[in-house]
Image (tube, rainbow, N blue to C red):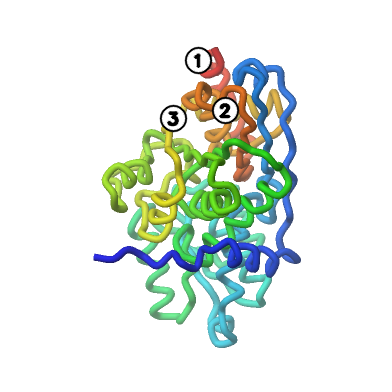
Amino acid sequence: MTGPDTSGMTLDAIRTNTAAIAGQVVHTPSIEMHSPLIDRVLDGGSVTLKLECFQHTGTFKARGALSVARGLDADQRARGITAASAGNHAIAAAWAARQIGASAKVVIQSNANPFRVAMARAEGAEVVMMPPGPETFAEAERLVRDEGRTFIHPFEGLGTSLGTAGVGLELMENAVGLDAVVVSIGGGGLISGIAAAVKQINPACEVFGVEPTGAASMSQSMSQGAPVHLDKVDTIADSLGAPMALPFSHALCAAYLDDIVTLDDDMICAGMVVFQQEAKLAVEPAAGAALAAVLGPLRDRLAGRRVGVIVCGANIDAQSYLKLMARGRSALDGLCT
């Protein structure tokens, strides 16, 4: 049985796609994080933050959604798009639809943060709420079947990975000489694109993925050599709670990733605290996971090295943020000692 065709993920294709959407997305800053804590824990190493939290819609998701949406023909644009999401992808898909003059009817899990639901509506989307899991995707499939809408997948496919690869391309161009890049993993749409870009620019630069222990679909897939579906997802990092890996993103991860580490939710919250205290950034748990991995399970492997960290998003309401920060402060000593 042959795997998915990933031949379209060339460096030339990544550069072409990145240039094509450059006028509509933000070329987000890559900034070195000056922190005594980082200096101590990494033994003189450095961290450069790629600030995708400053992207349109508050996360990296805008890049992949727009890359897919731009490929729709006139008839598809007239029929509109749909998406299935815990929040961030729905926001980005609605935004991308607006950029191409299409309508958006997005399906969001009923347990999604109301803040993200409101953001999707603010981007012009009609929102359908469904129970989390298969029913969310089933409703999106119904909208494709009954209304002729085009489904923009949250993390799978060439267009999505080409879009997210722009994050890696910009980072490598703006932070020359990185030894490693650390990326959080949900379904794999972000890390598949970044890893493809980073490794084709500099094969010696290591790429590490980070997953919650309660949503480790990609690390299990890498261990088994094929995409897996999880029976249960249990993490406060809802953006990283994809219940499965899928063939295209898994194939790119298998080709380009050096390793994946997992973190419990307490460590993820502690990473959010470090972002706030050391970088003055209020981020969502998915972003906190990447920095927590640098300071925790990856610290010995990254000591003395130049590390890029993807700050993937910051879509979180004040009440949830304060609750998770309190949890993170309790766990901080265990992360940084």
Q: Can see residue 136?
A: yes
Q: The disc labelled 3 sits on which kind of residue? A: Leu
Q: Quadrant of residue 288?
A: top right
The front one of 201 and 145 is: 201
Q: Horizontal and vertical percent for residue 37?
A: 66, 18
Q: The disc labelled 1 sits on which kind of residue? A: Gly
Query: What number of labels is visible?
Result: 3
Mark 3 Cα-neighbour bin, 10 Å: few <14, some 14–19, many ≥20 = many
The front one of 97 and 165 is: 165
The mark nearer the N terminus, 3 or 2, is 3
Element type where label 1 sits in the image: helix
Q: The disc labelled 2 sits on which kind of residue? A: Gly
Kindly give the residue lying farthest to the bottom in the view shown.
75
* Label 3 sits on residue: 263
Q: Quadrant of residue 11?
A: bottom right
Q: CA distance from mark 2 to mark 1?
A: 11 Å
The mark nearer the N terminus, 2 or 1, is 2
At x 53%, y 82%, the residue is 76
* Label 1 sits on residue: 334
Q: Quadrant of residue 45?
A: top right
Q: CB atoms at circles 3 and 2 under 8 Å apart? A: yes
Q: Horizontal and vertical percent for residue 86?
A: 48, 52
Q: Is residue 20 above or below residue 210?
A: below
Q: CA distance from mark 1 to mark 3?
A: 12 Å
Element type where label 3 sits in the image: strand
* Label 2 sits on residue: 271
Q: Is residue 123 above or below residue 69?
A: above
Kindly give the residue lying farthest to the left in the view shown.
1
